[in-house]
Image (cartoon, rainbow, N blue to C red):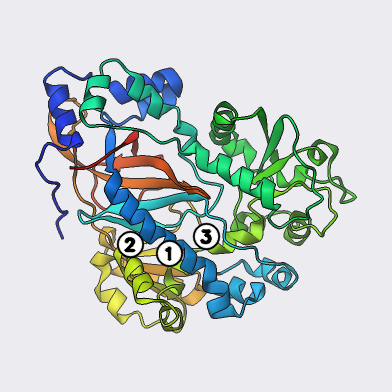
Amino acid sequence: MSAPERSASQDPATDYLRAVRDGELPPDLPASTAARVLGPDIEAQSFHRVMFVDERELTSFYADFTVLLDVVGRLPHLLAGGSTAAFGALTDVPEVLRPLLAGTDLPALVPYGRADLIHDGTGFKVLELGLSPAVGGAERTAWLPAVMEEPAFRPFAERHRLRHLDPITALLDLLRTVETTHTGHHAEAPQPTGQAEVLMVEATGALAEWAGDWRPLGECLEAYSDRPLRTRLAEVADLHEPDGSVADHVAGVTHLLRLFNLTELAEEPDPVLAWQRLHPAPGSAMPPMATSPVHDMYNSKACLALVWLPEVQDALTDGERAALRRVLPETTHVDAATDLTGFVRDRASTILKPTTLARGEGTVAGWTVDDGTWRAALASAAENGRHILQRRVVQRVEPGFDTDGVTERDWYAVWGMHYGPGGFTGFSCRLTTVPGAVVRGISNVLLAPVLLHPGA
């Protein structure tokens, strides 16, 4: 199946390439601004042009996306009678944690994350909700105003009426929401006065690998907060003393920001003890967490399959069902009872994903492997469960230059839509020259700043 082509009209993307060829715009604008505000690593990984999103299209898409979030938030009641334990089984919570679910309240869904999207030429389609504080991209917020403020870029921006949003504001909104509602905690938690202090919490042992990735996010929070705010990094094991009391350096913190998922929590040295301490009883000195670990059940990719179940579809309005069809590819949960016959045949149009892993880990795109490998992957998924099969979304072509900065060639994008309690707050974008490539974090892609335009 070939990828759909973009229109050849003078949209911002087409005009940007012309402006570079004609010398109106520098060929390295994203890289030069990244070097100034983000550092040499992002400079070296910068795509050669700015990416653009039609704001009218985005507004329409986001209305459908909020329907999807609302339906996911209703799944525990539609399918599990409101039971945290039953919903945990449906969303593939790790076995070691499931006995603990019966004694844990399930909070309401809090909208915050970075949804991974693909544009197929007709509109954006949702690959993953990214409904978690442990997502990247917002730390590059400063890139956007830096591009807009470049003198050489201003005439272009004015001609196309471009503007930018600040992705980091979604996370700041999330912290305010948790501060106001004390999600999962008691109303007697310490009230922040003066400087806010956010403790960014990773899984035990994870900071040796990930500290360098999370520090820029903390710095961005500090820079964009409308009140004094300080961030620090910690691990789950740092939150309590050996006797179970909250550590002194934690008791005065205003927020905990969760940077780990349920799979990582299950791998803690003592996952049961970690769970109990991270879901404290009323009266605990633990600060409120954005968001509690149990909230991670909503982020399971199993939810993208559950919304298609007949008992869920029958509970929706015609408008809700239409919204889901517009933005969500057909998705099926895989277990031993799944009939795989059609999926074996449809290898070239199907992708297999673990329900609870991140950064593309364990994902197998059928169109990238041979029949034998695909059959083996399906058999393994059916045996152990905890996987979904999703219909492939074919990316539209994104025009750009080759590495020489002169020759035009096709690129393919995975878009990251940042959203929070107040709505969408911007985009990030990862690009590759390989159509249908599985994007795993930012290791095999180029990065681009994304601006909004009002459309034709």
Q: How would you rate the neighbour count of disc 2 (Cα within 10 Å): few for under 14, some for 14-19, many for 20 or more?
A: many
The label shown at residue 299 is 3
Residue 224 visible in the snapshot? yes
Quadrant for residue 36, please give it.
Answer: top left
Tell me the distance, in whole angstroms, between the alpha carbons under discs 2 and 1. Answer: 9 Å
Amino acid at pointer 2: Val
The label shown at residue 68 is 1
Q: Secondary structure at mark 1?
A: helix
Residue at 10 percent across and 40 percent down: it is 9
On screen, residue 94 versus residue 197, left or right, reads left
Q: Quadrant of the C terminus?
A: top left
Q: Secondary structure at mark 3?
A: helix
Quadrant for residue 318, please give it.
Answer: bottom left
Residue 181 place in picture, x, y as percent: 68, 53
**Considering only vertical position in the picture, is 104 above or below 270?**
below
Callouts 2 and 1 close, C-beta under 8 Å = yes
Residue 363 visible in the snapshot? no
Front disc: 3 or 1: 1
Looking at the image, tell me whether mark 2 or mark 1 is earlier in sequence order.
Answer: 1
Amino acid at pointer 1: Leu
Q: Secondary structure at mark 2?
A: helix
**Considering only vertical position in the picture, is 426 above or below 277?**
above
Residue holding disc 2:
327
On screen, residue 120 versus residue 73, left or right, reads left
Tell me the distance, in whole angstroms, between the alpha carbons under discs 2 and 3. Answer: 17 Å
Residue 161 place in picture, x, y as percent: 26, 31
Between 410 and 63, the one nearer to me in the picture: 63
Between 334 and 153, the one nearer to me in the picture: 153
